[in-house]
Image (cartoon, rainbow, N blue to C red):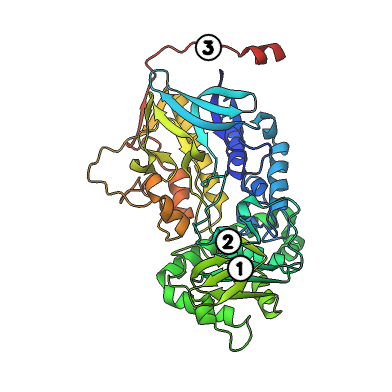
């Protein structure tokens, strides 16, 4: 069994960022990245549907230590994957990745203060041990997405596709396409398919909030002439960070006014008389769920051109040639795309235990939104829902390396957040009403009603806590291993290779 000081699970944008911070701030620590897939990139390697792109601006979705240097504000999936790969190569991180290694179970041994990770590989099960486990495996199940049980689905004679399982070279040219859903995936797919499809219809039970964002930034060129290209990108990154936080606070403070402004912007992009209230006015306030980005208004342009349309109503059943609504209307379809969401999954689906006792994550609390009560020497990465994912991933990385160095300095082997307050009231991990979050609420760790068990989703607050806050705050408890640890034996195959 191979042993490392730190094991990072996942070679996506979070895992590569974690490895960078570990190398820089804890240079003597050994580490490996265990990646289930055969390539790095995570989300940006998995999703292959037409138009796959970021739903956050790239100046903040990119790394603070290796800024995004392309004028694209919203980037396509392949470009983001290339960026992650280039970052890993530049810093030598790619040499530490074990591809095709899916972690399925993790167990912490309190006596030796070590995690054992059981992983599935093509060669069979492999086991790895480490002192600290860093879960950067994302927040949803990679194996399959969420598809409701639609009555009559077996009667439909056309093709059915979930965006998470997009077939290679899928041909939809000249076909009638119905996309079920109105979230970020649907809004991305629809304008991207109109160049080949006969017509694309977005079928939604209820609308989502949309806002436009420019596809590229003209500011970069102008600023580069004044302060130089590298500084221009860094300044633009900070401007976007501040802008995101201010806009989020303003929208949450005055949701009705924000909703009016968002609807006004939609009306301005659609033909006179279009029923905006029916198709684009959600039942919930802005930021009760994530807002959907529409780069350069491409969805509205497709509607204006007659290449796409929106239908709002409830499904009665699928029929041989399409979908029948409860209104009695039938939407003809050759292809139905179920952009109906994700399955949220904590720890990449790995079953967690401590000293052989299974841990029910649904009954735990999250410590500062990245660690779990009573799970020692472990951090997991979950980014912002109101801003770019990577902003929080970077801050979590900075905290983890501070924690590791604090443990080394103090001679500690174990760090575990402990809740000994019986009055702490559990609340959902995320205060969003999105379906994919509500479906998984009971399986996810809870946040508490007070610090440090809150998950505040505030970048500037997190800077103070994660970058500069006390490590020994009385909740994070430290101790030493009780068992003497023998040097791990090399596996025969690895020894022979060396």
Q: Which residue is mark 2?
A: 155
Q: Position of residue 299 (x, y in %)?
A: 65, 71
Q: Position of residue 132 (x, y in %)?
A: 49, 28
Q: Residue at coordinates 35% horizontally, 46% vertically from top-left?
A: 453
The tag on residue 322 is 1
Which one is in front, 309 or 368?
309
Q: In the displayed structure, does residue 349 sit left or right of residue 428?
A: right
Q: Position of residue 347 (x, y in %)?
A: 48, 39
- Dot 1: element: strand
Q: Nearer the viewer, mark 1 or mark 2?
A: 2
Q: Residues within 10 Å of mark 2 (few under 14, many from 20)?
A: few
Q: Which residue is mark 3?
A: 487
- The disc, 3 or 2, on the residue closer to the chain's N-terminal end is 2
- The disc, 3 or 1, on the residue closer to the chain's N-terminal end is 1
In this view, which residue lies farthest toward the bottom? Answer: 273
Q: Residue at coordinates 39% horizontally, 50% vertically from top-left?
A: 441
Marks 3 and 1, how far apart in space?
Answer: 63 Å
């Amino acid at each position: 069994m191979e042993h490392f000081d730190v094991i990072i699970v996942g070679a996506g944008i979070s895992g590569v960022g974690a490895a960078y911070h570990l190398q820089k701030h804890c240079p003597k620590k050994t580490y490996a990245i265990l990646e289930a897939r055969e390539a790095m990139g995570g989300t940006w390697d998995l999703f292959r549907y037409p138009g796959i792109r970021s739903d956050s601006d790239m100046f903040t979705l990119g790394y603070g230590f290796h800024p995004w240097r392309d004028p694209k504000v919203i980037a396509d999936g392949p470009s983001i994957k290339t960026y992650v790969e280039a970052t890993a190569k530049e810093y030598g991180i790619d040499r530490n990745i074990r591809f095709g290694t899916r972690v399925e179970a993790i167990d912490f041994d309190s006596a030796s203060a070590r995690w054992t990770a059981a992983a599935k590989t093509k060669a069979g099960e492999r086991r790895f041990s480490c002192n600290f486990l860093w879960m950067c495996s994302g927040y949803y199940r990679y194996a399959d997405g969420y598809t409701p049980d639609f009555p009559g689905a077996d009667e439909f004679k056309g093709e059915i596709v979930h965006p998470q399982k997009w077939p290679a070279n899928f041909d939809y040219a000249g076909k009638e396409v119905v996309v079920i859903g109105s979230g970020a995936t649907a809004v991305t797919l629809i304008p991207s398919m109109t160049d080949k499809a006969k017509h694309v219809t977005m079928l939604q039970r209820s609308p989502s909030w949309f806002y436009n964002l420019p596809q590229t930034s003209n500011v970069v060129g102008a600023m580069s002439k004044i302060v130089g290209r590298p500084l221009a990108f860094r300044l633009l990154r900070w401007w976007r960070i501040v802008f995101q936080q201010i806009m989020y606070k303003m929208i949450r403070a005055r949701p009705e006014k924000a909703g009016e402004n968002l609807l006004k912007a939609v009306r301005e992009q659609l033909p006179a008389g279009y029923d905006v209230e029916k198709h684009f006015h959600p039942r919930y306030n802005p930021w009760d769920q994530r807002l959907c980005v529409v780069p350069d208004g491409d969805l509205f342009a497709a509607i204006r051109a007659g290449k796409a349309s929106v239908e709002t109503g409830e499904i009665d059943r699928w029929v041989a040639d399409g979908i029948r609504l409860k209104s009695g209307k039938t939407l003809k379809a050759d292809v139905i795309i179920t952009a109906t969401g994700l399955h949220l999954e904590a720890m990449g689906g790995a079953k967690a235990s401590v000293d052989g006792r299974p841990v029910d994550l649904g009954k735990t609390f999250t410590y500062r939104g990245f660690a779990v009560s009573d799970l020692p020497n472990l951090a997991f990465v979950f980014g912002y829902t109101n801003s770019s994912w990577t902003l929080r991933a970077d801050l979590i990385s900075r905290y983890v390396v501070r924690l590791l160095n604090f443990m080394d300095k103090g001679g500690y082997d174990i760090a575990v957040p402990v809740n000994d307050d019986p009055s702490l009231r559990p609340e959902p991990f995320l205060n969003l009403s999105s379906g994919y979050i509500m479906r998984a609420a009971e399986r996810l760790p809870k946040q508490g009603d007070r610090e440090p068990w809150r998950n505040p989703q505030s970048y500037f607050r997190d800077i103070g806590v994660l970058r500069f806050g006390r490590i020994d705050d009385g909740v994070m408890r430290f101790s030493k291993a009780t068992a003497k640890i023998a040097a791990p034996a090399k596996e025969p195959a690895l020894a022979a290779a060396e």
